[in-house]
Structures are given as structure tokens and as C-alpha cells.
Image: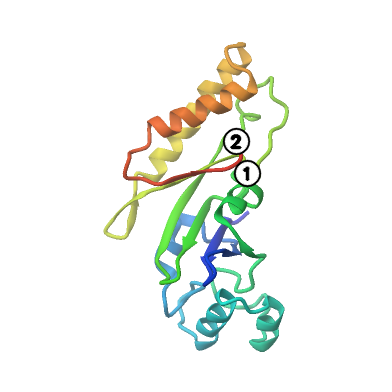
Amino acid sequence: MGHRALVAYERTDGTYNLHYTHWGGSNLRLKHTITEATPFGGDTPAQWAREAHQALTTGSDPETVRDSYTIDGSCPTDVEPIPRETGVTLTEILTAHLDYLHHEAFYVVDRELEVTAYRTLWFGLQYDADSIDRQPTVGFGAVRTVRWYEGEPVGDGRARGEFAGMKRVVGAMVDRGVFDEQSATQFLKQQVQATTDTDRGMLFGAID
């Protein structure tokens, strides 16, 4: 299945290009592999990658960039060099593009190639409540940063486990009639906010 994630690169106009990575969600490793020398990740610095990143973030047409550097599916980079969306805002990404169930992580890369890594939190309860048949995955959740110590994400697995446990409890409360779907979603949002330290960033999709 991979460890799918989305990567948003800031453009010179303040919007973002949105790229896909099939394995980049694993251990949030793109936090370190995206650098000035390797803007799309990977182990080997390449001039073409730096030039392609520069062209794309200054507004060049992706197809022109693809043809200019003969970019295809065999590129040895962690992130697909050609964006799937261009000129989108973070709000648009969070509400219309990020799949909180199937994308394990979300990265925001600023113009200086500083990387902020987020874990995705899907608010869907269809696997936790027998009375809920299906809920959306795109735009339905939150992303939360993690702590880092000596280059490693601290407590990442524990935090994900705690959120999964919280969802099981809320799902049981839905089945007992304590919550309907809307109130359950709002309760999850409130609990995530309440249990997140103030020094950790959070962003929400279209869950209201």
C-alpha cells in the first residue's frame, strides 16, 4: 500500500504546488530528505531537481517542466517532481485534496525549503461505529505537527494510538445514541484541540 502523503511547496505568489509521494509518510522521513540540494527528496543531489523546483515554484507550466527535464515515473526522488495541483491555497488543500484516511502525512515546504511535517487525523467513524455506514475521507479531519528530538519524531506512534482509542470510544457512544454523527465530529475536534499541546500546530479540514 505504501505510506502515502501530500507535499505542498510554497510558490513565489504565496500559493502552493501540491505533489504526491507514495512512501513519504513513513516515519515522517521527508522532514529530513527535502533539502536545498534535494528539493524532492532522495539520496542524490541533482541540478535538474533544483532547476525544476525553481521553475515550478515561480509559476512555470508543469508540462513544460516535464518535457524540459524529461521527467517520468523513473525519477529517483521521494516526491513526484510534477505537481498534481498548482496555485492552490492551504485551505483548498486541507478541504478538497488531502485524504485524511489514505494520506498518512502532510508536509508544507516554504520558500527556504524549511519543512513542517504533519500527521493526518481522520475523523471518520465508519470503522468504529456500527450505526455509521460511510463518511468522507477527503477534507474530513485535522493535521497535527509532532515533536522532534535528535532528528526523530517523539511520541508519534503513541499519539496516533491515543487518537485511535479516542475514536473507538466516540464510536461506541454513537451506537448508544449519545452522539449523532455531527456532534461526534465536533466532540472529536474539541478533544483533539484539548489534548494537543499549545506549541504544536494544528490545521483543520472542512469538518464544521
Residue 46 tag number: none
User: What residue is drawn where x is 62% and y is 11%?
Assistant: 177
Q: Is residue 133 visible in this depiction of the protein? A: yes
Residue type, numbered disc 1: Gly
Q: Tell me if 201 is positioned left or right of 129 in this view.
A: left
User: What residue is drawn where x is 38% and y is 48%?
Assistant: 146
Q: Quadrant of the N terminus?
A: bottom right
User: What residue is drawn where x is 55% and y is 86%?
Assistant: 48
Q: Which residue is mark 1?
A: 139
Q: Are marks 1 and 2 in contact (CB under 8 Å)?
A: yes
x, y percentage for residue 123? 57, 34
x, y percentage for residue 11? 53, 70
Which of the marked residues, 1 or 2, is nearer the chain's N terminus?
A: 1
Q: Residue 144's quadrant in the figure?
A: top left
Is 174 placed above or below 102 here?
above
**Colour scheme in the image?**
rainbow
x, y percentage for residue 104? 54, 50
Other-residue count near label 1 (Cα within 10 Å), few / some / many at <14 / 14–19 / ≥20: many
- Name the one closer to the observer, 170 or 22: 170
Residue type, numbered disc 2: Ile
Q: Which residue is mark 2?
A: 207
Q: Residue 202's quadrant in the figure?
A: top left
Measured in 3D between alpha carbons, the distance from the residue under mark 1 to the one under mark 2, in whole angstroms, is: 7 Å
Q: Residue 174's quadrant in the figure?
A: top right
- Name the one closer to the observer, 29 or 63: 63
- Name the one closer to the observer, 42 or 124: 124
Q: Secondary structure at mark 1?
A: loop
Q: Is residue 165 visible in this depiction of the protein? A: no
Q: Secondary structure at mark 2?
A: loop
